[in-house]
Image: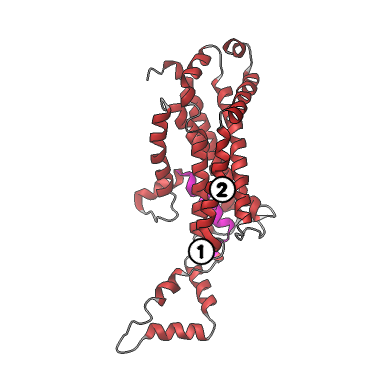
Amino acid sequence: MSEKLHYRGRIGQISIYLGKMLRMFVYQNDWKVLPMAALIGGLVTFAVGPNMYVTQEGTISGCFALICACVWNGFFNSIQVICRERPIVKREHRSGMHITSYIAAHMIYQMMLCLLQTGIILMIVDVAGLKVHSAGLISKYLLVDMGITMFLTTYAADMLSLAISAFVKNTTAAMTVMPFVMIFQLVFSGGLIPLTGPSAIFTDYTITKWGLQSLCTLGDYNSQPMVTLWNTIWKFRAMEVDGQKPIKLMTDYILKNNKLDEVLLESGMYNGEKAYEYISSNVTHCWTMLGIMVIVFAAAAVIILEFVDKDRR
């Protein structure tokens, strides 16, 4: 195979390695990432429940869960693909293999996997009856816009994982590093955990931030009701002040006059986020940032492997 590669151009080498990866997909059980995506999608959808794109709390938690599923899928797709054949890469590189062709083949192959995984999760979301059939902000369909966001998120995580796989020495090291990278993505997403001060700077460098921001924008987060404030107030109905129960009187008045929906919507307006404003530029900016990450991580993998012959680890 090395002699054959030596006389091939970059395009020819891409086809050779892409064919090799497709055979591995069939004969070495790499297809198992697809049922795993279905399982993860099912668990996430079950956990999200019917409140995604209905209330602000349901939207933020549901979008966060979906983005976590996308990042998880992307990481597992490629975390071991290069380091497990590092000696082969060294040998074939010395025989004339172009690193750019090798990584390009991986990018095409991983893109196909990410598309399939995204499609599987979207089908599960659709079957589960989540509110995803309204009009989209960019396209005509919300499900299409969500699919683009989820694909780009999965693909960016995949390319980050590919770069890590190109850097580490073996599969054991790769699987050791991956949980720390995953934790960084979750903690610094800026979604469920509010970050202020210097720590907030790191959010711009996470895949999860841009995926979460895009999904929340697509769901029109700012126009949805917020129920946390009402639920908190309700817990204090029995509290007495000078022998009276003012909170009980207030809540009873709201319920008696059918003002609850109005209060919840008003609460949502005060809890709105500028980053989730329902405008197309918010979404396209997120897509652009995810696309840039794909390019940067892929380029990093190429640069790292260009020095594979000098690696004595």
Residue at 38%, 85% in the rendered image: 246
The x, y position of residue 206, in whole percent, is 46, 44
Between 32 and 113, which is closer to the camera in this rendering? 32
Circle 2 — which element?
helix
Q: Quadrant of residue 308?
A: top left
The x, y position of residue 143, in whole percent, is 64, 53
The x, y position of residue 233, in whole percent, is 40, 76
Q: Is residue 297 magenta?
A: no
Please state the extent of the stretch shown in magenta in the rendering: 206-222
Local crowd at mark 1 within 10 Å, few (<14), some, or many (≥20)?
many
Residue 56, numbered label: 1
Q: CA distance from mark 2 to mark 1?
A: 22 Å
Residue at 50%, 76% in the rendered image: 263
Circle 1 — which element?
helix
Residue at 47%, 68% in the rendered image: 270
Q: Is residue 212 magenta?
A: yes
Farthest residue toward the bottom? 243
